[in-house]
Image (spheres, grey):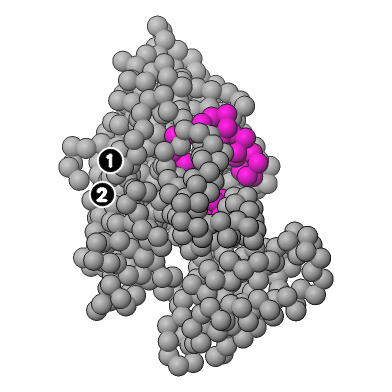
Amino acid sequence: MDNNQSLIRLYATSFKENWLHSALTDYKGISYTYGDVACHIAKLHTLFELAGIKPGDHVALCGRNCSHWGISFLATLTYGIVAVPILHDFKADNVHNIVTESDSRLLFVGDSNRKELDYDKMPNLEGVIRMEDFSLNMSRSTQLTESFGKYLDAFNKKYPQGYTSADIKYYTDKPEEVAIINYTSGTSGFSKGVLIPYRALYNNMMFAKKVLSMKSGMNVLSILPMAHMYGMAFEFLYELTQGVQVFFLTRTPSPRIIFDAFSKIGPTIVIAVPLIIEKIIRKSVMPKLQKPLMRFATKIPGVNNIIYRKIRNRLLKAFGGNVTEVIIGGAAFSPDIDALLHRMKFPYTVGYGATECAPIISYSDWQEAKVGSCGKAAYGMEVKINSLDPENVPGEILVLGPNVMLGYYKNDEAKEQALDKDGWYHTGDNGIIDSEGFIFIKGRCKNMLLSANGQNVYPEEIEAVINKMQYVTESLVKQEGEKFIALVFPDEEALKADNVSDIPAKMEELRKSVNKLIPSYEHISEIRVMNEEFEKTPKKSIKRYLYE
């Protein structure tokens, strides 16, 4: 990346050019223009200065998605502070640990999290700021306490005629400086603080500008957690560089709430994790297509196109009617849903990323995307497969480019495992890459199982077959000795609707059906019924380590 490029300058420019346009809106709540956001940022900068907070210091943020989360984050970023976003659904002990491990001086916290926290367990924290109104909730610093009593007066004295776009003056960032420390539980069970430099964020913004046609006046609905890089980058950071209005749900994003918001907001781009899309398709589309008459009709050339077009149009209308593309990422996408959406020419694509790449690794526009693939290497990035035959034999996916992290905070051992001497990031994912550069993920390296005859088995591929079966909500395949065991959380509504009382017998039928569809060396020996759904990471991936 050119050293003259600046991530922060993108925001200074956007605020000036879109001063009167709507920027951040809490759905059915308060709204701020770009000028409002800039003014709030300037007030917080005045507070930081008086409190002795300096560029390079660490400040944590923990709360639900909302406009004030966005303002708090942008204020830290544009001051040169290292932001430490913490997922709001982390347990209190996780928050205590991350705040302490990250050496954060301040914590911006929302009310939904604040009540659960024990400040005594964060002994090095100097103060806590309530996100809802930017008031001081706790202080261990006399300087911080005094700053809260005078920073608004200081701001008004500094700008007696009011704060204008001409007054914007932000920190000058350098490409290799740390912008964010992003902690994620991952599926290993151990959080690591990913050191994300400004260059990685900047290159992600340049990638988004090339592939997403967004401009001032368009809308986006923020569904994914802002503290996670996927949602932060493509539902918030990029939009604010383009003058787009971002709406926050500010509540748990159930399908009903999401689609009510879609109908009123009419977003241009939808960013989603597979779980949301799969729920919609399995509940609203699949049952209709599985009816005998519909099955017959979809096999008739010409008629099937009409049916798929009607379903496609209904789906687009459900997404608000303005959507040009639905981008899916963050976890593995069900192959059968992937194939169905492709067949009906629905404008969706599946991307691939990692927190360590802030987050984008690969992407392809929906019109060129291939079923089962997660696209080609993104702008500025290189991808290779650690295999002697990368088109046919899966190997670990390795990534190189400006999006790659600097390492992990205070964890050189983990950095050495993830980054080799040439700067390639070892993703821990297995995959292949075809002659056109399309990447196909085959599973996690650490999840790979070994069959009795020495065959590599990827549990995700078996789970994809199981999850297509009637009466299955989700599954996990693990190995016990030489046997493969499937843990299944059943679809209780479907079982009840069909008056199925003998669930073990039904699962045994399912096991036999699955084994007919997979190679013999992958056969399932037993299905165990789970009484509750699997525990998941923030990306909605199953925490495998809890069940293995």
Which region is colored magenta? 249-278
159 versus 309 height, above or below = above
Between the C-alphas of marks 2 and 1, the distance is: 8 Å
Q: Give the residue at mark 2.
A: 379
Residue 110, label in figure: none
Query: Within the magenta stretch, is there residue 272?
Result: yes
State the residue position of label 1.
210
Question: Would you identify the image quadrant in which residue 501 lies?
Answer: bottom right
Whether pointer 2 and pointer 1 mark residues with C-beta atoms closer than 8 Å, the reply is: yes
* Residue 47 falls within the magenta-colored stretch: no
Residue lying at the far bottom in this picture: please name it: 453
Task: Tell me which residue sits at (44%, 70%) in the image.
Answer: 443
Q: Position of residue 30 (x, y in %)?
A: 58, 23
User: Residue at the top extreme?
Assistant: 161
Mark 2 lies on a secondary structure that is loop
- Mark 1 Cα shell of 10 Å, populated few (<14), some (14-19), many (≥20): few
Q: In the rendered structure, which amino acid carries the disc numbered 2?
A: Tyr
